[in-house]
Amino acid sequence: MDEFEKAFNQFKSMRMESIANVTIYGSEEYKKLMIDSDRLFTELCTYVKPEGMKLLMDYCNVVTLLQGIAESVMYEQGLRDGIKLT
């Protein structure tokens, strides 16, 4: 990965976090879904045997990483689309 790509990825990460802090985290719909997600995860953990918790946590981490990749790809596409409009 070259220096430009590293810098661009850092910019994307900071920009998406900024958008999340201002827009997403203030959303009532987002807050409600986070509460539901936490409740469901906690309930699910009561059904998982101790030896299955690592597997469950690994699964959650992979799903989170997949979502991060999808968000990054969509952000990049949005930048490309925005540049084409000018």
Image (spheres, helix red, strand yellow):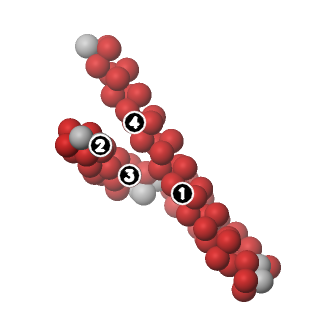
Of mark 2 and mark 4, the one earlier in the sequence is 2
Disc 2 secondary structure class:
loop
Q: In the figure, 78 relative to 13: above or below?
A: above
Of mark 3 and mark 1, the one earlier in the sequence is 3
Q: Nearer the viewer, mark 2 or mark 4?
A: 2
What is the distance, in whole Å, between disc 4 and disc 3 at their CAs? 13 Å
Query: Which amino acid lies under the numbered mark 4 shown in the image of this protein?
Result: Tyr
Q: Which residue is mark 2?
A: 1
Disc 3 secondary structure class:
helix
What is the distance, in whole Å, between disc 3 and disc 2 at their CAs? 26 Å
- Front-most of 51 and 78? 51
Q: Nearer the viewer, mark 3 or mark 1?
A: 1
**Residue 75 tag number:** 4
Query: Which amino acid lies under the numbered mark 1 shown in the image of this protein?
Result: Thr
Of mark 4 and mark 3, the one earlier in the sequence is 3
Residue 44 percent coordinates (x, y): 74, 74
Of mark 4 and mark 1, the one earlier in the sequence is 1
Residue 81 percent coordinates (x, y): 37, 20
What residue appears at the point 26 percent right and 13 percent down from the top-left corner?
86
Q: In the figure, 9 relative to 55: above or below?
A: above
Q: Which residue is mark 1?
A: 64
What residue appears at the point 72 percent right and 86 percent down from the top-left corner?
50
Q: Nearer the viewer, mark 3 or mark 2?
A: 2
Disc 1 secondary structure class:
helix
Of mark 3 and mark 2, the one earlier in the sequence is 2
Q: Which residue is mark 3?
A: 20
The answer to the question of whether label 4 and label 1 lie on touching residues, with beta carbons closer than 8 A, is no
Residue 83 percent coordinates (x, y): 29, 19
- Front-most of 68 and 35? 68
